[in-house]
Image (cartoon, rainbow, N blue to C red):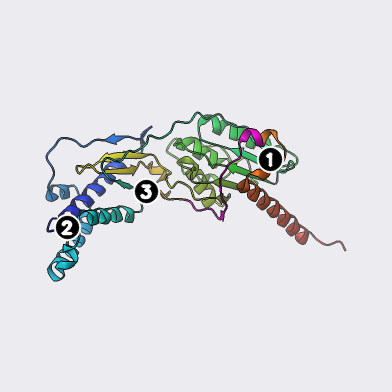
Amino acid sequence: MKTFPICLMIFLSSTVFCMAEDQDAATNPPATTQEKPAQAEPKASPDELLVKASPFRKETLAKINEILAEVEKNYPVAVGKYNSADEDKIIRAVVTSLNSGIEYITAGTNIPEEPKKEITPLTAIIISSQKILYQRIDSFSPETYAKLKDDCENTARLANRPIGLLMDLRDCQGYDYESCLKSVALFCAPEKVPKAEGMEMPKRVLNIPVIVLVGNKTKGTGEIFTRLMSEGGQCLISGGGTAGCPFMKTKVVLKSGNILMIPSVPEYLSNIPAAQISPATSVTPYPQIAYEKLSTTAGSEESDKCLLRAIDLLICLEALHKEQKKRESPKPK
């Protein structure tokens, strides 16, 4: 068990070094999940791994080593009872504590490829007795952004606007960050939307109450859009917890054969946490009504509990707004 502290040191060194490498390449995220296979080179010693260590890594490793050394010296039974399975648990706990969306996966685990979806931009429709605008987006892309922008501009020109907008992102995935941010800009003030240098953003065109529907299939830019809208005070989130994977991940194979899945985060999105989003109003998000049925069958929204709850919320919000306007209007003399 004397090798236990060294094992932990090597892992921490490898993990933080891989994160540093990933941050250097963050401004050019990969189009697909990449893999860095283990190379046939001599295994680096702990001292060699520390040569390129950041101050954080050196300080952390020094403190961990000091703690384990004192435990081995003063309470050897506490360390002596651990086995390789315990080491694996501790390593996983260390990765989790980084709170950066990094996954530690056992060697030999099958990691499925990101599914490729053929996305057709869907036209916004008016539902619930012509009161509410419904927009479903299953992936942000130049095409879906252009369609959303067109629908928002048309809605803004209406004499009798819908009382609110339902953005259905319950099956939204993909990693087109630029299209996602441009979509956010249609609803938010410019200063609240992050962007890469040179990225041209549209002007805000629609200002009505928005509820975003999400679930555990909401992933990637679906999560980024939802978080930015919520933090900008532009929407209420309803449904279930999201996937907790807003960024594309790079696969790094360690010398042990175990795997790290490390988020590739563009610098301009570095303030967005790689974490699950919990809706303000929790509603079972699925089954999700088919767009074709919703767009052709009046009253079909009643079969979708998550959608129906959001409709009720928007109607209640409109009723409260009208009541407030009555109280604020001057009374006739």
Residue 330 versus residue 193 in the image, above or below: below
Say which quarter of the image contains residue 128.
Answer: top right
Pair 3/2: label in front: 2
Tell me the kind of residue under disc 1: Ser
**Residues in magenta, as a range:** 277-294
Between 21 and 203, the one nearer to me in the picture? 21
Q: CA distance from mark 1 to mark 2?
A: 61 Å
**In this rendering, would 47 be left or right of 274?**
left
Going from N to C along the chain, the mark reached first, 1 or 2, is 2
Residue 269 seen by the camera: yes
* Residue 312 image offset from top left, x and y in percent: 68, 51
Residue 41 coordinates in the image, percent (x, y): 13, 37
Residue at image position (33%, 54%) is 96
Q: Which residue is mark 2?
A: 5
The amino acid sitting under disc 3 is Gly
Q: Amino acid at mark 2?
A: Pro
Q: Who comes first in sequence, dot 3 or dot 1?
A: 3
Was residue 285 drawn as part of the magenta stretch in this picture?
Answer: yes
Whole-angstrom CA distance, mark 3 to mark 2, is 25 Å
Is the C-beta separation of discs 3 and 2 under 8 Å? Answer: no
Residue identified by numbered label 1: 300
Residue 101, label in figure: 3
78 left or right of 273? left
Quadrant housing the N terminus? bottom left
Q: Which mark's residue is nearer the viewer, 3 or 1?
A: 1
> Visible in this render: residue 192?
no
Q: Residue extending furthest bottom?
A: 74
Residue drawn where x is 71% and y is 55% of the image: 321
